[in-house]
Amino acid sequence: MSHACAHHDHDHHRPADTPARLAEAEALCADAGERMTSARLRTYELVLDAGGPIKAYDVIDRFHPDGAAKPPTVYRALSFLEQMGLIHRIESLNAFVACGAHDHKHTAGFLLCDCCGRSVEIAIPNVADIEASAGATGFKVSHITMEARGLCQACSQE
Amino acid sequence: MSHACAHHDHDHHRPADTPARLAEAEALCADAGERMTSARLRTYELVLDAGGPIKAYDVIDRFHPDGAAKPPTVYRALSFLEQMGLIHRIESLNAFVACGAHDHKHTAGFLLCDCCGRSVEIAIPNVADIEASAGATGFKVSHITMEARGLCQACSQE
DNA sequence: TTTGTTATGTAATAATATAACGCCCGTCAA
DNA sequence: TTGACGGGCGTTATATTATTACATAACAAA
Ligand SMILES: [Zn+2]
Ligand SMILES: [Zn+2]
Ligand SMILES: [Zn+2]
Ligand SMILES: [Zn+2]
């Protein structure tokens, strides 16, 4: 991801648990009767390895050792992974991030640092209040996007 | 806007109060020492007249009676209007909508109907809880995006 | 007027995302 | 075994959304 500052270490080394997460994902798909194909697995691997929000075209560029993937290959995989709850789309960044929870199929909120670009997945506080507020006008909520922009602790200390 | 259904009247006639809103906007800018130029006013007029979320390129296409505006003209105006609190950007639609409140410079939440495409601006419930949830990790919130997708009352009754 | 600042005009391009089509491959029933 | 079907993928092309860059114009202050 891009950054608004240069005062932090932005190296994101490969999370140690990527292989375990890939295995979990394969199990999850098998349980659901869905196919975890190689394109889907590779896409998920790249999102996991990013260690934070990653753009679709960064996945596309990294997909093959030599040369990029075709956009539909990656967009299809991203859609699938999102439907499986393995990743989330971050609307205000046009980016994707691996789900940080193990109970998939939830709607998550995000804290997005405008300085270092990192994201933190949080439970949306008071979902019931949002649904009640909507329900007062007869509106039925199916999905909530909640993204808070600001500065993370590290970035607000300099 | 596009619609997922054809069972409602989707005509949005020009809201009767557009001239008054334009005048208010001019006064607001004058008070703030900002210039409400013709490009900005025309852009605001088109967003108001849309009567709901409108895409940037729809503004671009409608900007001149004969032929489209150049994208930067409209994107600049949209940015200005958003900074003035006259319009809001809806991230999950890549669209813009006129602010429904008279106290500008707030962050608003939206209920977005997936069927008829209409939006309702609401106060974000429990902003304090979101800020508290963020603050627990040292995160300082500057702006909250909250967009609930679902079905409005009219659309869920058929 | 001069000068600095803000806004606009214009061309080009970047960045994000989808449509459309045909092929392959696995499943399943005949 | 064979054929029909459906899902996933490869490929090309295109659609949609947004910005960069630089020149000019309008404005405000000195
Ligand atoms: Zn999650
Ligand atoms: Zn940060
Ligand atoms: Zn508003
Ligand atoms: Zn509706």
Image (tube, coloured by chain):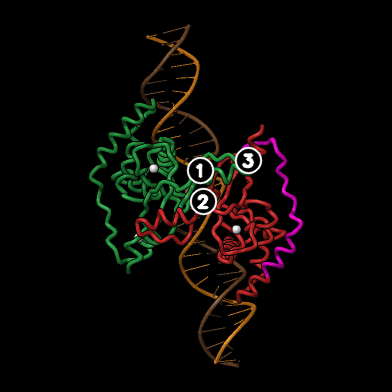
Chain colours: A green, B red, C brown, D orange
Q: Secondary structure at mark 3?
A: loop
- The numbered disc on residue A128 is 1
> Which quarter is ligand 2 in?
bottom left
Dots 1 and 2: beta carbons under 8 Å?
no
Q: Residues within 10 Å of mark 3 (few under 14, many from 20)?
A: some
Q: Name the residue: 35% across, 41% down.
A: A101
> What is the three-letter code of the residue carrying label 3?
Gly
Observer-side mark, 3 or 1, equals: 1
Could you give the CA–CA distance between mark 3 and mark 2, rounded to whole angstroms?
A: 18 Å
- The numbered disc on residue B146 is 2
Nearer to the camera, A23 or D22:
A23
Residue A106 at x, y percent in the picture = 43, 39
- The numbered disc on residue B57 is none
Q: Name the residue: 45% across, 42% down.
A: A107
Identify the chain of the residue marked 1, using the numbered disc in the image.
A
Identify the image quadrant of residue A73. Answer: top left
Question: In the current view of this chain or complex, which residue is farthest to the right?
Answer: B16
Pointer 3 residue: A138
Q: Secondary structure at mark 2?
A: strand
> What is the three-letter code of the residue carrying label 2?
Met
Q: Residues within 10 Å of mark 1 (few under 14, many from 20)?
A: few
In which quadrant will I find the C terminus of chain A? bottom left
Disc 3 residue: CB within 8 Å of ligand 4: no
Identify the image quadrant of residue D24. Answer: bottom right
